[in-house]
Image (cartoon, grey):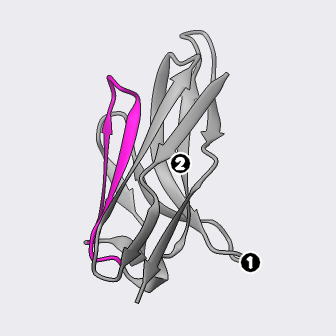
Amino acid sequence: QVQLVESGGGLVQAGGSLRLSCAASGSIFSINVMGWYRQDPGKQRDVVALITSGGSTQYGDSVKGRFTISRDNAKKTVFLQMNSLKAEDTAVYSCYADVRSNRLGQYNVYWGQGTQVTVSS
């Protein structure tokens, strides 16, 4: 069993900043990719940012230059620093992790419950 616990969402004015955190716990041997996705009601879930265990990153086109993803492997935690926020960034942000439970097992995907980010103009 693996759990992802998110924090840091909330209400912020356009141009402001927020920092999201997601901590993984449970039966974990290693974590490959961690990241963040977001979704508005009635829309498809879109990738925001991804990061590998070695620190390689990938960003969605709409957030490049404004958001930064990072991780602390010892704490099994991924972060998303969001700067210069726009009204269009309003969405539910969900944490993602590809987890291996033991050295003989395979990787499986887990999701957090999501945290609301609202940007007012």
Dot placed on the residue nearer the N-terminal end, 1 or 2? 1
- Distance, label 1 to label 2, CA atoms, is 19 Å
Asked whether 94 or 29 is in front, the reply is: 94
Q: Position of residue 116 (x, y in %)?
A: 55, 63
* Residue bearing mark 2: 95
Whether the magenta-drawn stretch holds residue 80 is answered as: yes
Amino acid at circle 2: Cys
Quadrant of the rendering where the N terminus is positioned = top right
User: Which secondary structure dominates the residues rendered in magenta?
Assistant: strand
Residue 114 location (% of width, % of height): 60, 53
Q: Amino acid at mark 1?
A: Gly
Quadrant where the image shows the C terminus:
bottom left
Q: Secondary structure at mark 1?
A: loop
What residue is drawn where x is 25% and y is 72%?
65
Per the rendered image, the range of residues in magenta is 66-85
Question: What residue lies at 57% left-to-right and 12% top-to-bottom?
Answer: 102
Residue 30 horizontal/vertical position (percent): 47, 21
Residue 59 in the figure: left or right of residue 92: left
What residue sits 29% from the left and 68% below the top? 17
Q: Is residue 112 left or right of residue 20?
A: right
